[in-house]
Image (cartoon, rainbow, N blue to C red):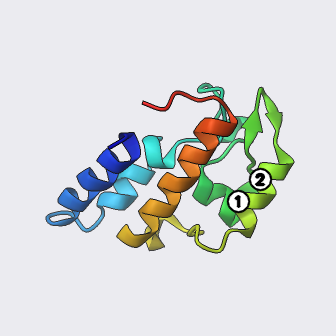
């Protein structure tokens, strides 16, 4: 069980008492909702977004590798119909897709995979 599986389990538990658990997790860069970059200091201010923000095409947010826009990965994310485009419409069944993408990004960008 990796950090993504752990977060999914945590969200499942929280949803029993808090219907906004997914939104709360998504409002901060937790593992499932972290920015698509290998530089932890990048965020929306630098044009970097999380999977959902990129999918939604918010103010041209992109994936970033080594401080530069990664147009190829950004386009792949935008094309994946399984990624929700709104945090508030994200459901428990969407979370494994986000985990799958985060694992892929970990490998592509040599991010820590704890």
Residue plotted at (77% across, 26% down): 66
Query: Quarter of the image containing the N terminus?
Result: top left
Q: Nearer the viewer, residue 81 or 40?
A: 81
Q: Which residue is mark 1?
A: 77
Give the crowd class for mark 2: few <14, some 14-19, many >=20 residues within 10 Å: many
Asked if the residues shown at circle 2 and circle 1 are in contact, with their CB atoms under 8 angstroms apart, the answer is yes
Q: Is 30 located above or below residue 13 in the figure?
A: above
Query: Quarter of the image containing the C terminus?
Result: top left
Residue plotted at (67% across, 63% down): 55
State the CA–CA distance, disc 2 to disc 1: 5 Å
At numbered mark 1, what does the secondary structure look like: helix, strand or loop? Answer: helix
Residue 87 at x, y = what percent? 49, 64
Residue 23 at x, y = what percent? 39, 59
Q: Nearer the viewer, residue 44 or 65?
A: 65
| Relative side of 13 to 58, left or right | left
Q: Is residue 10 visible?
A: yes
At numbered mark 2, what does the secondary structure look like: helix, strand or loop? Answer: helix
Q: Which residue is mark 2?
A: 74
Q: Is residue 60 visible?
A: no
| Relative side of 52 to 23, left or right | right
């Amino acid at each position: 069980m990796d950090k993504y599986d752990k977060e999914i389990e945590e969200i499942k538990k929280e949803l029993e008492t808090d219907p906004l658990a997914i939104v709360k997790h998504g409002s901060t860069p937790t593992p499932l909702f972290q920015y698509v970059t290998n530089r932890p200091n990048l965020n929306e201010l630098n044009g970097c977004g999380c999977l959902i923000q990129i999918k939604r095409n918010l103010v041209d947010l992109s994936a970033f590798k080594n401080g530069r826009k990664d147009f190829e990965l950004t386009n792949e994310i935008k094309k994946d119909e399984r990624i929700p485009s709104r945090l508030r419409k994200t459901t428990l069944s969407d979370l494994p897709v986000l985990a799958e993408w985060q694992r892929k990004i970990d490998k592509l960008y040599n991010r820590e995979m704890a």
